[in-house]
Image: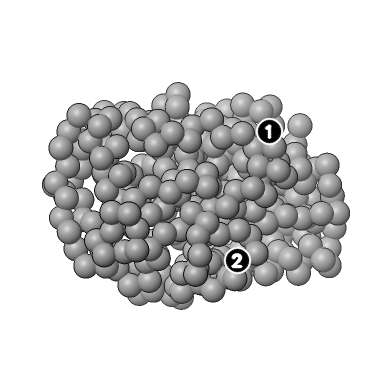
Amino acid sequence: MASVLVTGGAGYIGSHAVLALKDAGHRVSVIDNLVTGFRWAVPEDVTFHEGNVADEALVPRIVAEQGIDAIMHFAGSVVVPESVSDPLKYYRNNTAASRTLIESAVRSGVKHFIFSSTAAVYGIPDHTPVDEETPRMPINPYGTSKLMTEFMLADVAAAHPINYAALRYFNVAGADPAGRTGQSTAGATHLIKVAVEAASGKRSHVSVFGTDYETPDGTGVRDYIHVSDLAAAHVLALAWLEERPDESVTLNCGYNRGFSVLEVLDAVERVSGCRIERRMEPRRAGDPDALVADNAKILDTFRWQPRHGNLDTIVSHALAWEEKLAARV
């Protein structure tokens, strides 16, 4: 079993990866600055370090003390509109910090690096579903900051004894089926999180941005992937890298199935039994009509078998976590 350092392990996706790694028998350490993460999201038996991934003294110390074999890198900023208004924050937190972390990994002899990338690297593709060879043309600093890190990893792996998996997430949603962790950040912008907050009475309504897209019901279509299926893909990525020390891989993480905004809201109403007020708003700049993953490559490469792909299942887990989160307050 490997010793894995999870950056951003107190956050949404990172905390699920910590659980998946532990469940698989790996030794896990976490580094998180707790700007958006929560200390309680990290299990008590996981070594926790509060700090920044760009700390050139702390990261090598953790690697040495814990005998780190692999890094799973989730730390970063993820709000697309904020990246447009504050691009330098994103190039600092996502690109510059990743560069420093990768350098620390190389200098410390870390063998494997798994990177949290995004479908935002594709921008507005001219077709859907998109495969990994679809042109990468990000239209916002968030997508560009992630793509720049992909470029760095490719160059570093060609020059040093380290390999990597870059996993391009589509729309991550849901929560741990056992209720151990979930999406907890205040002011979240992801549709399913927003919708279950509305169903729980935390929001008065849900805005629907654009009703004139070239889709069956006119609203945007996205590929929603359950966060626990995504975490499982990271554990499989680690095994793949360990077995192939001279190879690296870039893969889409999605279900090859899209749902529209209205279909998602219908599902939340169906599962919760609550009516959600829908406010029709103008389109947001840069939103594609549809963005769905061609997932053939990850299914073949990792033999990944998603377990929670049903939309109602994703919603039910998100809703259960929302209720548990409310009880914490």
Q: Is residue 72 left or right of residue 164?
A: left
Residue occupying image coordinates x 79% and y 62%:
157
Location of residue 296 with respect to 180 vertically, above or below = below
Location of residue 23 with respect to 99 vertically, above or below = above
Q: Position of residue 164 (x, y in %)?
A: 73, 54
Label 2 neighbour load within 10 Å: few <14, some 14-19, many 20+: some
Task: Please tell me the numbered disc located at residue 27.
Answer: 1
Residue occupying image coordinates x 27% and y 48%:
262
Q: Amino acid at mark 2?
A: Thr
The quadrant in which residue 184 appears is top left
Q: Nearer the viewer, mark 1 or mark 2?
A: 2
Q: Secondary structure at mark 2?
A: loop
Residue 328 visible here? no
Label 1 neighbour load within 10 Å: few <14, some 14-19, many 20+: many
Of callouts 1 and 2, which one flags the residue occurring earlier in the amino acid sequence?
Answer: 1
Residue 227 visible here? yes
User: Where is the N terminus found, in terms of image quarters?
Assistant: top right
Q: Position of residue 44 (x, y in %)?
A: 52, 29
Residue occupying image coordinates x 69% and y 37%:
303
Q: Is residue 211 left or right of residue 128?
A: left
Q: Amino acid at mark 1?
A: Arg
